[in-house]
Image (cartoon, helix red, strand yellow):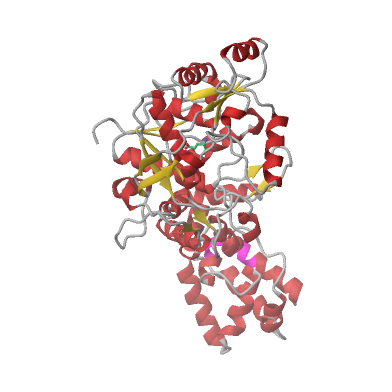
Amino acid sequence: MSAKVRVRFAPSPTGPLHIGGVRTALYNYLFAKKHKGDFVLRIEDTDQNRYVEGAENYIIESLEWCGIAFDEGPGKEGDYGPYRQSERKDMYRKYAEQLIKSDHAYYAFDTADELDAHRKDHEERGKTFIYNWHNREKLQNSLSLSEDEVREKLDADENYVIRFKSPKDEKLHIKDEIRGDMEIDTSTLDDKVLFKSDGMPTYHLANIVDDHLMQISHVIRGEEWLPSLALHFMLYRGFGWDAPKFAHLPLILKPQGKGKLSKRDGDKLGFPVFPLEWKDPSSGEISTGYREDGYFPEAVINMLAFLGWNPGTEQEFFKLDELVKAFEISRVHKGGAKFDPEKTKWFQQHYMHEADEKPVAEKLEYILQKKEIKASSAYVLEVVKLMKERAVFVNDIWEQGYFFFVAPTSYDPKNAKKSWKEGTSEIMQELIDLLKEQQDFEAEALQVRVKTWIEEKGIGFGKVMQPFRLALVGAMQGPDLYVIAAMIGKEETISRLQNAINTLG
Ligand code: GLU
């Protein structure tokens, strides 16, 4: 590759970034870093009607959480800014006018009502109204009206749009880095609006002008933009600019069956489709996010990387830096990629096992703080060491190990019935007396002492150990009981035994 690789992620801030958008950002990032290039974030906010408060921040926070760092973008100015299209507004008009001068575009004055009437009329005849070469001479535009008429309308400030003049029947040959060579027939394309009299460009014009001015070398984006490719190609040609290379990423499909994964699927099927939780500013509706559901970004990144790509080897676990090395755009699939929420959990489990205990402990401390439970950092770290092996999420450590932090407030009724019988309270009282005398409260010493005592008494182990566990944990779960007793300490162990006697005795 000769010229410097520069790619961009160009979301419109119309709502929370969908997980598919994160994948587009990720693949752009991987491609850029692989080729020692730049990754640009450009906010495409020309459509003010669809602007959603907070969406831009959400996009930036999502990328940050994933570790997908941009080299240039809002708040990280480079040589090609500004990086918000609304701040670039004034530069687009001259490009639209340039296309008119070179006969690649024209003014159109048809009102919304007139266009509606045409649409209805076509519908009634079982046809679709397309504004292009086959009817543009009969419509209200600078190709059908005289120069004077056009001038008059413009001077009178009549509303207009600038439309691209799509060629009649040309076969375009365009290469996509993933799909290969494509032939597109221009005769069915409509004359897309590029610019409106309110001074705002549409997506198509702003996108091409900015990609050119920002010296973007590769456009990597979702398959849903494939229908725009012919127009974009013709725009570059109309301007006389070299087009970047294009790569359209495969659709992300629902876990079951066919169809595109939609923003609604997550809540319907019970898994997040957003990186972070999102609260809709107008309805207040909350959509869950991977971060809040306890996933590590490594798991989400690993899952997304495989959603449309594979390394061609058996290796499945890749951290971001490993992905940078392994990623090849030529290995991205054409066919849709099925979303697999279970696989994400599997990645999460792996990264939980791999995780250092300290950061996990910090996350657990955060959960405890929210529950207003006090525990020293050293103690929380010990619990993590004991419980991490069996956990997928940090919250599992709380759910499977709450008894390290709080005494049971109730006892599982089934277990209680089975293990707390006639005489149990007396045995537990004897155990309390024994523990009171015990100096060394380490797990091993405790075990030796209690075992000897049980043997001396000549009763079954279950008669002691089951109610003992019930008293400390509240149910028949958790790791080695002596470890639990040693962790919570002598005083707490005795107090929990006493509570159980009072409640169940
Ligand atoms: N603003 C478009 C979007 O929201 C950008 C598409 C493109 O990458 O060209 O996805």
Spot occupied by residue 461 in the image (x, y as percentages of width and height): 56, 84
Q: Nearer the viewer, residue 154 or 323?
A: 154
Specify the quadrant of the image occupied by residue 199.
top right
Magenta range is 486-494
Q: Nearer the viewer, residue 216 or 425?
A: 216
Q: Is residue 233 left or right of residue 315?
A: right
Which image quarter holds the C terminus? bottom right
* Residue 12 falls within the magenta-colored stretch: no
Which image quarter holds the N terminus? top left
Instruction: Name the residue at 40% across, 29% down.
Output: 236
Instruction: Name the residue at 50% across, 54% down.
Output: 252
* Residue 490 falls within the magenta-colored stretch: yes
Q: Is residue 306 visible?
A: yes
Q: Nearer the viewer, residue 480 or 100?
A: 100
Q: Is residue 357 left or right of residue 428?
A: left
Instruction: Name the residue at 58% across, 84% down.
Output: 462
Spot occupied by residue 366 in the image (x, y as percentages of width and height): 58, 47
Q: Nearer the viewer, residue 124 or 35?
A: 124
* Outermost bottom residue: 458
| 239 vs 494: above or below | above
Q: How many marks?
A: 0
**What is the chief secondary structure element of the magenta stretch?**
helix
Q: Is residue 66 visible?
A: no
Spot occupied by residue 151 in the image (x, y as percentages of width and height): 60, 11
Specify the quadrant of the image occupied by residue 270.
bottom right
